């Protein structure tokens, strides 16, 4: 501790430009208060300059804020003028003192333009000056309203305690109901209560509006994310199957240069048809994205699984399809559209993965679809492992990132079912269960 009561921490804070905050600062008299206030002002200016240097926008009062502040000033001034005759003033007060009192009320109305920057300090100053002036009720109401709107409830409660502190003392004096001062005082405290209550109401409404806007923004973000996921899932399901057929047949032509003209023609026809169908599917998806109000593109159903298997067989794959599902005309109710579409996508992804990661295009793939109304629907796809076994895929296979299986899990979950996949001995097994209500 130095000779003037300043220790090392205070000197270090002073050199750094921060306000001195040692407890002895409170006991230094006017000089200490001046140094403390100067330090805080300098520190605030440094922070403001640093924020401007970082490119942070400086909050300035706009036209709306100016209009509101002028309205608050006019309200307080009109309240002062209209309530001048109703204020109880001691008859012994001189005209000069009364004029000075009214001038103080006018200055308090002008000080309301500082309410945005210093709401608590302004309210406390006006409340402390109120016992010495009869024309501060209007500015005090505006200041308390500002504190209730812009500050946390704890701060508002502290200021309210200061505002209503004289009320118990006044009531303890048992004032007479016929005394004009009693009516004036009770009216004053009622107006303060109304100002604080109205400010709290405005604050709650603003917080509600902010929360609703944030909720709407989150909902919009979530909707955009779901839309992107739906588009990505649809693009993967539609194009991966077609492009895998292209890759398989292009690879066959590359590794079999001595193929006959008939084999080359069939492979070229499959490549042409697959490319054409892929372009058609892509055009349909882009058309839906550009004009979604025209309606959704036609979606596959469970009966299209046979057509899917036929396309793979035409491409040279050995597909064994077992469909143990009653005819839709004989079942009541039929397979739900969502369940049928999900089953189709699962079979499509299973055949695509078999071509991408299997030992070759002629490897056997078994597809089993069973189900009935009230019992649910099961889909199982099996294909053997590549030459490297289950742990290592075959060389030259089509690359994949596993996004298709992730999308299938999401589809099955949205349909109310489950999806399992993994190695079962030397076979890769894809198994899904989907609901089929009775």
Image (cartoon, rainbow, N blue to C red):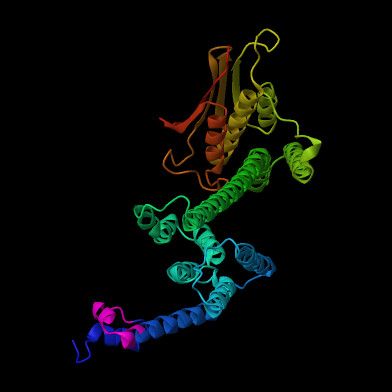
Near-viewer residue (123 or 4): 123
Question: Which residue is rendered at x = 48% and y = 60% of the image?
Answer: 151
- Asked whether residue 23 is drawn in magenta, I would say yes
- The x and y percentages for residue 390 are 43, 38
In the visual, does 67 lie left or right of 46? right
Question: Which residue is rendered at x = 55% and y = 43% of the image?
Answer: 403
Near-viewer residue (168 or 85): 85
- Asked whether residue 252 is drawn in magenta, I would say no
- The x and y percentages for residue 21 are 30, 78
- Give residue 234's quadrant in the image: top right
Near-viewer residue (381 or 61): 61
In the visual, does 3 lie left or right of 247? left
**Going by the picture, which residue comes out furthest to the front?**
92
**Is residue 360 visible to the viewer in this orientation of the structure?**
no
**Going by the picture, which residue comes out furthest to the top?**
330
- The x and y percentages for residue 56 are 56, 74
Quarter occupied by the N terminus: bottom left
The residue segment tinted magenta is 20-33
**431 in relation to 122, above or below:** above
**Is residue 3 visible to the viewer in this orientation of the structure?**
yes
**Going by the picture, which residue comes out furthest to the bottom?**
3
Near-viewer residue (63 or 306): 63
Q: Main secondary structure of the magenta part?
A: helix
Question: Which residue is rendered at x = 68% and y = 13% of the image?
Answer: 328
**356 in relation to 109, above or below:** above
- The x and y percentages for residue 51 are 51, 77
Question: Which residue is rendered at x = 50% and y = 79% of the image?
Answer: 48
């Amino acid at each position: 501790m130095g000779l003037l009561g300043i220790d090392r921490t205070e000197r270090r804070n002073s050199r750094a430009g921060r306000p001195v905050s040692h407890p002895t600062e409170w006991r230094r008299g006017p000089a200490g208060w001046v140094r403390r206030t100067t330090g805080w002002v300098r520190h605030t200016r440094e922070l403001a300059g640093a924020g401007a240097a970082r490119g942070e926008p400086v909050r300035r009062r706009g036209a709306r804020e100016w209009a509101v502040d002028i309205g608050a000033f006019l309200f307080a001034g009109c309240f002062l003028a209209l309530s001048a005759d109703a204020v109880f003033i001691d008859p012994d007060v001189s005209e000069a003192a009364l004029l000075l009192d009214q001038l103080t009320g006018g200055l308090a109305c002008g000080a309301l333009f500082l309410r945005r920057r210093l709401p608590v300090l302004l309210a406390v100053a006006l409340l402390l000056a109120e016992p010495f002036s009869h024309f501060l009720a209007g500015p005090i109401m505006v200041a308390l309203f500002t504190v209730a709107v812009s500050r946390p409830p704890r701060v508002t409660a502290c200021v309210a305690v200061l505002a209503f502190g004289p009320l118990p003392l006044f009531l303890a004096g048992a004032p007479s109901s016929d005394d004009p001062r009693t009516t004036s005082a009770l009216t004053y405290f009622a107006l303060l209560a109304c100002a604080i209550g109205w400010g709290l109401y405005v604050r709650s409404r603003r917080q509600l509006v902010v929360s609703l806007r944030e909720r709407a923004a989150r909902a919009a973000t979530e909707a955009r994310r779901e839309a992107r996921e739906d588009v990505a899932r649809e693009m993967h399901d539609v194009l991966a199957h077609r492009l895998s057929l292209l890759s398989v047949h292009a690879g066959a032509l590359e590794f079999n240069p001595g193929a006959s003209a008939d084999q080359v023609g069939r492979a070229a026809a499959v490549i042409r048809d697959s490319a054409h169908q892929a372009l058609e599917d892509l055009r349909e998806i882009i058309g839906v994205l550009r004009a979604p109000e025209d309606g959704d593109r036609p979606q596959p159903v469970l009966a299209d699984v046979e057509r899917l298997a036929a396309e793979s067989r035409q491409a040279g794959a050995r597909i064994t399809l077992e469909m143990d599902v009653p005819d839709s005309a004989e079942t009541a109710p039929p397979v739900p559209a969502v369940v049928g579409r999900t089953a189709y996508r699962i079979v499509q992804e299973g055949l695509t993965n078999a071509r991408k990661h299997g030992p070759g295009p002629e490897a056997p793939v078994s597809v089993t679809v069973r189900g009935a109304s009230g019992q649910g629907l099961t889909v199982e796809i099996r294909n053997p492992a590549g030459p490297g076994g289950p742990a290592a895929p075959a060389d030259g296979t089509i690359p994949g990132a596993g996004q298709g299986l992730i999308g299938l899990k999401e589809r099955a979950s949205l349909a109310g079912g489950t999806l399992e996949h993994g190695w079962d001995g030397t076979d890769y097994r894809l198994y899904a269960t989907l609901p089929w209500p009775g």
